[in-house]
Amino acid sequence: MKQTFTTNKSVEEIILKIQEILPNYGFGLQHIHNPPEKLREKGIDFNTECKILDICSPTIANEMLSADLSLSCIMPCKIAIYDDKGQTTIALNSIVQLVDDINPDLIESAQEAQEAVENIINESL
């Protein structure tokens, strides 16, 4: 399941705000992907602004990976931020659903991560 949020702030404004808020929830930024730039490097003319943030809570990651290392295939959490016809959209997959598909015993940790990411996004709007 995908969740989306919209705002009139620019992609860059949202990224800066999220980076500011992350530590308040025990999360950190691992990487910012730039798909349009990568596609242009490969000769594909793609110009819609889009960035993907890899974020992680070391505490939650340690708990989940210690219990089931196969959860590494869905880590870190990703937040997509892109321009959709002049409005900025923030999208993420349901962490709860992803974890439930792999190890239902860790739903509580997934819910904790999901709520934190939702709060981070809502505060950035």
Image: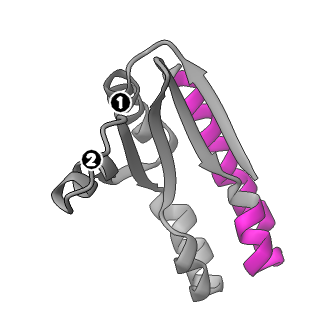
Q: Amino acid at mark 2?
A: Asp
- Element under label 2? loop
Q: Is residue 117 above or below residue 124?
A: below
Say whether marks 2 and 1 touch (CB < 8 Å).
Answer: no
Q: Residues within 10 Å of mark 1 (few under 14, many from 20)?
A: few
Q: In the picture, residue 100 is in which quadrant?
A: bottom right
The reply to whether the magenta stretch includes residue 111 is: yes
Please give left or right for residue 46 compared with residue 66 in the image. Answer: left
The reply to whether the magenta stretch includes residue 99 is: yes
Q: How many marks?
A: 2
Q: What residue does disc 1 label?
A: 20
Q: In the picture, residue 95 is in which quadrant?
A: bottom right
Q: Amino acid at mark 1?
A: Glu
Depth check, mark 2 against mark 1: the one in front is 2
Q: Is residue 5 above or below residue 39?
A: above
How far apart are the two marked residues, 2 and 1, measured between alpha carbons? 32 Å
Q: What residue does disc 2 label?
A: 45
Q: Residues within 10 Å of mark 2 (few under 14, many from 20)?
A: few
Please report the residue visible at 34 percent of the width from the left and 21 percent of the height from the top.
13
* The magenta segment: 97-123
Residue 42 x %, y %: 21, 63
Residue 11 x %, y %: 38, 27
Residue 33 x %, y %: 31, 53
Q: Is residue 13 above or below residue 44?
A: above
Q: Earlier in the sequence, mark 2 or mark 1?
A: 1
Please report the residue visible at 50 percent of the width from the left and 46 percent of the height from the top.
79
